């Protein structure tokens, strides 16, 4: 009995280790940072609406729940949401095309991160028409999470290596994979090296850059062409370009990544967290300004 039990446990652990990195977006820190930055940029209307949709347990803090889609993703009931965290391009194609790329591994159209961002925006916009029956708490949390994910360069990576998940590398002395480096390790090393392991310090530094060095870029980050409410496609295009230029470069299987890689890629990660936050706020501001009187239930 015990032996069988242990064996099953080991089997599960292996399965879990193989599946998790492929599905998670930015790690918990990255999602928290994106949503925290967004919260600071919300209009009054959007802040009211967001607070109205959050469950009491969040204590009006969107960032506290931005990793929820990663946490539930392992439940059988939510298994179908796995492909909504990313979009892959054909191998070695450093561009993104919605029609070509936005599908799951069975070829079902729209089942990818950009399709999901459109979907949950549409649901939040339909809030006035209560008959639609969407759960808008879920819509808000999915939208907030997926706008973060689409900014992680390797969430728009190559199909053949599952966005870097099968590219085994060392991060300093630790064996891991390239996708995990971009979800977690760069941020974790930055926290230890530069921010006294305090995520609030890192977030404040990024917020300061947004109001100083990037202040002239914010409006071009935030807007959508043709006055669309939401526009995830350019974000995905940026991500695959960054994946080719920074993530995959000098990180072939078996490479040990150290200071050179860390210090040259950290600015990319910090800018993507900033852009994710600015664009999440801009999107929520647009969604909730077009319907000033959403009733909460
Ligand atoms: C849109 O959201 C609904 C509700 O979560 C879900 O049932 C549907 O599959 C989603 N579609 C896409 C393309 O994400
Ligand atoms: C909406 O979704 C959340 C999260 O899944 C759930 O806790 C809540 O009960 C749902 N609300 C309704 C009205 O179904
Ligand atoms: C982390 O940093 C924030 C802001 O810089 C500060 O207010 C907080 O006290 C720090 N937390 C710890 C545990 O040092
Ligand atoms: C936003 O506006 C800037 C300047 O007007 C423009 O260059 C840029 O292409 C726009 N961005 C998007 C996503 O349409
Ligand atoms: C976007 O909206 C503004 C203000 O409503 C309007 O002046 C402008 O012409 C619109 N631009 C496009 C491309 O639709
Ligand atoms: Zn990921
Ligand atoms: Zn995710």
Image (cartoon, grey):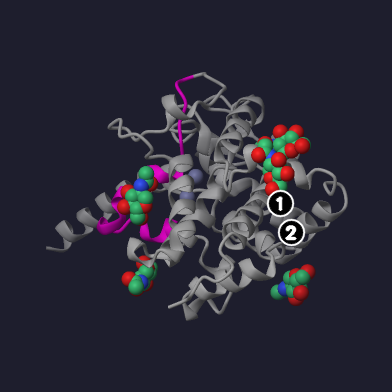
Q: Is residue 157 visible?
A: yes
Q: For mark 2, what is the residue?
A: 202
The first of marks 1 and 2 along the sequence is 1
Residue 202 x/y as whole percent: 74, 59
> Label 1 belongs to which residue?
190
- Looking at the image, residue 238 sits to the left or right of residue 98; the answer is right
Q: Residue at x 54, y 58 (%)?
A: 28
In the rendered structure, which segment of residues is drawn in magenta? 69-91
Residue 182 sits in quarter: top right
Label annotation for residue 52:
none
The answer to whether residue 246 is above or below residue 268 is: above
* Tag 1–tag 2 contact (CB < 8 Å): yes
- The secondary structure type at the circle numbered 1 is helix
Task: Say which element carries label 2.
Answer: helix
The verdict on residue 126 being magenta is no
Nearest the eye: 282 or 54: 282
Residue visible at 70% across and 56% down?
191
Q: Is residue 78 magenta?
A: yes
Which residue sits at x=52%, y=43%? 180
Front residue of 187/208: it is 208
Q: Pinpoint residue 151: horizontal percent, then vertical percent.
A: 60, 43
Is ligand 3 closer than 8 angstroms to the Cβ of mark 2? no
Residue 266 located left or right of residue 175: right
How packed mark 2 is, by other alpha carbons closer than 10 Å (few <14, some 14-19, many 20 or more), is some
In the drawing, does residue 55 fall left or right of residue 246? left
- What secondary structure is the stretch in magenta mostly built from? helix
């Amino acid at each position: 009995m015990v032996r069988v039990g242990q064996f099953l446990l080991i089997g599960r652990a292996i399965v879990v280790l193989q599946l998790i990195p492929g599905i998670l977006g930015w790690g918990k820190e990255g999602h928290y940072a994106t949503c925290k930055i967004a919260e600071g940029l919300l209009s009054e209307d959007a802040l009211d609406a967001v607070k109205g949709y959050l469950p009491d347990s969040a204590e009006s803090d969107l960032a506290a729940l931005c990793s929820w889609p990663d946490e539930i993703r392992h439940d059988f009931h939510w298994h179908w949401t796995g492909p909504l965290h990313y979009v892959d391009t054909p191998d070695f194609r450093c561009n993104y095309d919605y029609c070509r790329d936005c599908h799951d591994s069975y070829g079902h159209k729209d089942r990818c991160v950009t399709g999901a961002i459109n979907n949950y925006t549409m649901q939040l916009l339909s809030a006035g028409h209560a008959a639609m029956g969407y759960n808008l708490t879920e819509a808000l949390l999915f939208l907030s999470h997926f706008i973060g994910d689409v900014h992680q360069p390797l969430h728009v990576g190559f199909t053949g290596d599952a966005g870097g998940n099968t590219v085994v590398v060392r991060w300093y002395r630790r064996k891991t994979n390239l996708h995990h480096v971009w979800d977690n390790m760069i941020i974790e090393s930055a926290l230890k090296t530069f921010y006294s392991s305090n995520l609030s310090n890192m977030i404040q530094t990024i917020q300061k850059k947004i109001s100083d060095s990037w202040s002239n870029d914010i409006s071009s980050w935030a807007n959508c062409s043709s006055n669309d409410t939401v526009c995830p496609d350019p974000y995905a295009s940026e991500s695959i370009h960054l994946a080719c230029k920074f993530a995959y470069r000098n990180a072939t299987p078996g490479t040990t990544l150290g200071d050179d890689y860390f210090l040259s890629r950290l600015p990319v990660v910090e800018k993507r967290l900033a852009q994710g936050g600015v664009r999440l706020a801009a999107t929520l501001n647009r969604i909730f300004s077009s319907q000033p009187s959403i009733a909460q239930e």
